[in-house]
Image (cartoon, rainbow, N blue to C red):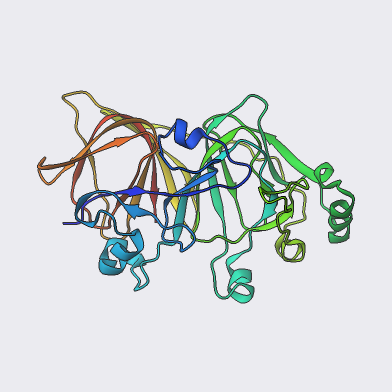
């Protein structure tokens, strides 16, 4: 039987991070600042560890190598997921950056994947903003001159952000998460980031972080971009659960699932034989039971649960919100 796996993340201490992931999500990771947690990851820069059941203590990579059928149609002998799921706490502005397409990454980054991603805003301080593309179409020489003179920000499109907003960031889009924003990020399984501008900050060793201007210019969309509008979202209700589609693209599909059960209600959940799923709990808590009620798993805000393809039938009880992520 293909049972759910509770995951433990890898943490990252980038200089712009805060403390919300430890305080709000009880990650208990001894890193300060705790900028990111890689919740469901088979990437070598930050693999997830299984923390439930017979595979406790093993990396998710090792489990998927041993059980490639857990990936369904994505089965491979490397134990690789095609996606990576993170929490990101931006106490300060992130660098202005861009990610390459799959085609560019394959040719110039040793066959790696590019990086298209989706952000779901879990919390945002008043007046928080993010960067989403350029306000007007620019020539490359204009952006290079702006970088040399420290005037890039005049060309960046800044968008106000509030809780529950979502943003789809296609590869090639110049972007940055702004100060005071806490997000869940679903992305391709890639760690390729080209920094354009980093506010002349220095790290804990007094060094400026590396910029990648030539590569960024090679992949950036320098056309003006319309300010992103929040899509119409429609909740579908059933007893004890409501759900809505947040994003569908060729890399992943993301739903928001709101569970609020009573004693008479049972929420059944199961993956099919084609693909794995991932449940990322962004609010609340509860219990997942399976194997006819003989086994159970408690979950809390911030937990991430990998659901193998062709999984056992599960019942979800509690009051919680999930991002339900599908390959």
From the top left corner, tell me how far across and down residue 121 is, in percent.
54, 36
Total residue callouts: 0
Classify residue 159 as left or right of residue 303.
right
Classify residue 298 as left or right of residue 254.
left
From the top left corner, tell me how far across and down residue 141 is, in percent.
88, 60
Residue at image coords 31%, 69%: 65
Do we see residue 307 in this rendering? yes
Classify residue 326 as left or right of residue 260.
right
37 shown above or below 301: below
**Which image quarter is the N terminus in?**
bottom left
- Residue 162, located in which quarter of the rendered image? top right
**Which image quarter is the C terminus in?**
bottom left
Q: Nearer the viewer, residue 229 or 41?
A: 41
Q: Nearer the viewer, residue 226 or 182?
A: 182
Residue at image coords 29%, 37%: 299
- Residue 196, located in which quarter of the rendered image? bottom right
Residue at image coords 82%, 45%: 155
Do we see residue 173 in this rendering? no
From the top left corner, tell me how far across and down residue 62 is, in percent.
31, 65
96 shown above or below 235: below
Q: Nearer the viewer, residue 46 or 86?
A: 46
Q: Residue furthest front?
A: 205
- Residue 226, located in which quarter of the rendered image? top right
Residue at image coords 84%, 53%: 147
From the top left corner, tell me how far across and down residue 39 is, in percent.
42, 48
């Amino acid at each position: 039987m293909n049972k759910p796996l509770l995951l433990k993340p890898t943490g990252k201490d980038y200089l712009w991070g805060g403390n919300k992931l430890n305080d709000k999500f009880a990650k208990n990771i001894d890193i300060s600042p705790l900028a990111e947690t890689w919740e469901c990851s088979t990437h070598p820069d930050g693999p997830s560890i299984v923390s439930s059941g017979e595979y406790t203590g093993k990396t998710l990579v090792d489990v998927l190598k041993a059980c490639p059928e857990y990936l369904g149609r994505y089965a491979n002998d490397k134990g690789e997921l095609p996606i990576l799921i993170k929490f990101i706490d931006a106490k300060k502005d992130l660098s202005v950056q861009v990610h390459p397409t799959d085609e560019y990454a394959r040719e110039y980054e040793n066959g790696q994947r590019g990086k298209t991603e989706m952000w779901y805003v879990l919390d945002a301080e008043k007046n928080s903003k993010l960067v989403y593309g350029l306000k007007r179409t620019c020539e490359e020489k204009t952006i290079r001159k702006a970088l040399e003179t420290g005037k890039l920000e005049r060309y960046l499109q800044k968008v106000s952000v509030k809780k529950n907003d979502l943003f789809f960031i296609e590869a090639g889009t110049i972007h940055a998460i702004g100060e005071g924003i806490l997000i869940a990020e679903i992305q391709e399984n890639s760690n390729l980031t080209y920094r354009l501008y980093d506010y002349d900050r220095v790290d804990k060793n007094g060094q400026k972080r590396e910029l990648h201007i030539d590569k960024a210019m090679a992949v950036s969309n320098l056309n003006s971009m319309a300010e992103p509008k929040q899509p119409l979202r429609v909740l579908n209700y059933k007893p004890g659960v409501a759900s809505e589609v947040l994003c569908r693209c060729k890399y992943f599909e993301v739903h928001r699932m709101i569970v609020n059960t009573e004693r008479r209600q049972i929420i059944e959940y199961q993956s099919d034989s084609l693909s794995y799923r991932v449940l990322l709990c962004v609010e609340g808590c509860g219990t997942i039971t399976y194997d006819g009620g003989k086994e159970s798993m408690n979950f809390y805000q911030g937990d991430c649960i990998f659901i193998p393809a062709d999984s056992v039938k599960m019942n979800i009880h509690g009051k919680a919100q999930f991002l339900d992520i599908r390959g």
